[in-house]
Image (spheres, rainbow, N blue to C red):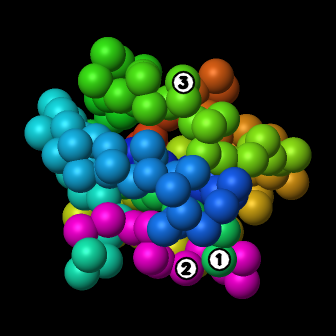
Amino acid sequence: MLYHLAQINIGRLIAPIDDPKIAGFVNQLDTVNALAESAPGFVWRLQSDSGNATDIAYGDDPFIIVNMSVWESVEALQEFAYGPRHIGVFRDRARWFEKMSKPNYCLWWVPAGHLPTVAEGRDRLTHYQDHGATPYAFWFSQRFPAPVAQAFVPV
């Protein structure tokens, strides 16, 4: 079975999504999403009918927004996330988001073709926050390989 890499990251906005303080972030969403979709190794991203995910609830706090995507490999996601086309938004995140006290991101392996739900992402992120990096949820700094399909040997 082939596996792909899923990622979730959340952020708590410093103001409502339609506040002028957040406009610099909102104004870049379409461009950044298009860059992700055209990046090598991109498979899927969470989005509503609006074309982005800022209106998808993560939990009860309306200031928390969620981003999820699926990639062919750790390397493909890392190249996009820390590459020149995305790093500017990443560096400016403190202008729009509060600093969170726990990790607000994690990675995990999914069977190719599986599209993770927000509930699945929340479960993985909570596990990562509570237990650190494990094969169930991890980060770039402590990776785990994709599961290996076990061969069936008839007896």
Q: Mark 1–mark 2 contact, CB under 8 Å?
A: yes
Residue 136: x %, y % from top left: 64, 52
Q: Which residue is mark 2?
A: 57
How many marks the image carries: the answer is 3
Q: Secondary structure at mark 3?
A: helix
> Measured along the vertical axis of the image, is residue 10 above or below residue 16?
above
Instruction: State the image quarter where residue 13 is shown.
Output: bottom right
Circle 3 sits on which residue?
A: 91
Which residue type carries mark 3? Arg
Q: Residues within 10 Å of mark 3 (few under 14, many from 20)?
A: few
Q: Is residue 52 above or below residue 150?
A: below
Comparing labels 1 and 2, the label whose residue is closer to the camera: 1
Q: Which residues are magenta?
A: 51-61
Q: Where residue 58 sits in the image (x, y, percent)?
A: 60, 74
Taking the image as shown, residue 11 lies to the left or right of residue 43, namely right
Cα gap from disc 1 to disc 2, whole angstroms:
7 Å
Q: Secondary structure at mark 1?
A: loop
Instruction: Decide if residue 63 is on the left or right side of residue 20.
Output: right
Structural crowding at the residue carrying mark 1, measured as other residues with C-alpha within 10 Å and reported as few (<14), some (14–19) or many (≥20): some
- Magenta segment includes 70: no
Viewer-proximal residue among 70 and 47: 47
